[in-house]
């Protein structure tokens, strides 16, 4: 656990992965898979395309950062109707 000076809030680095739900068709993934097969990569199947997002956020602790990331993903970064998301966070040392 890191100690912080009074008045400073820890910063967390987040990596967010957004993917289409398995039941949703992925035309971009299908196009990439087709292109790979045309290039001779016949062993490649099941291509799915998604998004990768990096960001930093300030929060009181890791639990608050996770809660904030859930809200960010639900409200803007992912479409919960057709997409799943997961994220990883790590506390960033103060500079």
Image (spheres, rainbow, N blue to C red):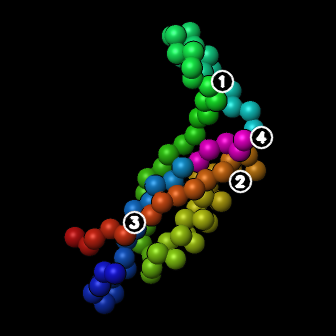
The residue that disc 1 covers is 30
SS at mark 1 in the image: helix
Q: Residues within 10 Å of mark 4 (few under 14, many from 20)?
A: few
Q: Which mark is residue 80?
A: 2
Q: Position of residue 77 (x, y in %)?
A: 59, 53
Looking at the image, do the residues carrying marks 3 and 4 touch, with CB atoms under 8 Å apart? Answer: no
Q: Residues within 10 Å of mark 1 (few under 14, many from 20)?
A: some
In this orientation, which residue lies closer to the viewer: 83 or 6?
83
Q: Earlier in the sequence, mark 4 or mark 2?
A: 4
Q: Earlier in the sequence, mark 2 or mark 1?
A: 1
Q: Tell me if I can see residue 33 in this picture.
A: yes
**Residue at the bottom extreme, as displayed:** 6
User: Is 24 positioned to the left or the right of 38 in the image?
Assistant: right
First to last magenta residue range? 18-22
Q: CA distance from mark 4 to mark 2?
A: 13 Å
- Camera-near label (4 vs 2) is 4
Residue 14 forms part of the magenta stretch: no
Q: Position of residue 37 (x, y in %)?
A: 57, 13
SS at mark 2 in the image: loop
Considering the image in quadrants, where does the C terminus appear?
Answer: bottom left
Q: Tell me if I can see residue 28 in this picture.
A: no
Q: Residues within 10 Å of mark 3 (few under 14, many from 20)?
A: few
The residue that disc 4 covers is 23
Q: CA distance from mark 2 to mark 1?
A: 22 Å
Q: CA distance from mark 2 to mark 3?
A: 24 Å
Q: Earlier in the sequence, mark 2 or mark 3?
A: 2
SS at mark 3 in the image: strand
Eyeballing the image, is 12 above or below 52?
Answer: below
User: Is 62 positioned to the left or the right of 42 in the image?
Assistant: left
């Amino acid at each position: 656990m890191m100690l912080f000076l009074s008045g400073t809030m820890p910063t967390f680095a987040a990596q967010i992965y957004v993917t289409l739900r398995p039941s949703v068709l992925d035309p971009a993934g299908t196009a990439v898979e087709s292109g790979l097969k045309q290039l001779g990569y016949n062993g490649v199947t099941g291509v799915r395309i998604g998004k990768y997002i990096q960001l930093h956020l300030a929060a009181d602790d890791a639990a608050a950062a996770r809660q904030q990331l859930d809200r960010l993903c639900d409200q803007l970064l992912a479409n919960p109707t057709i997409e799943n998301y997961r994220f990883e966070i790590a506390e960033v040392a103060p500079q």
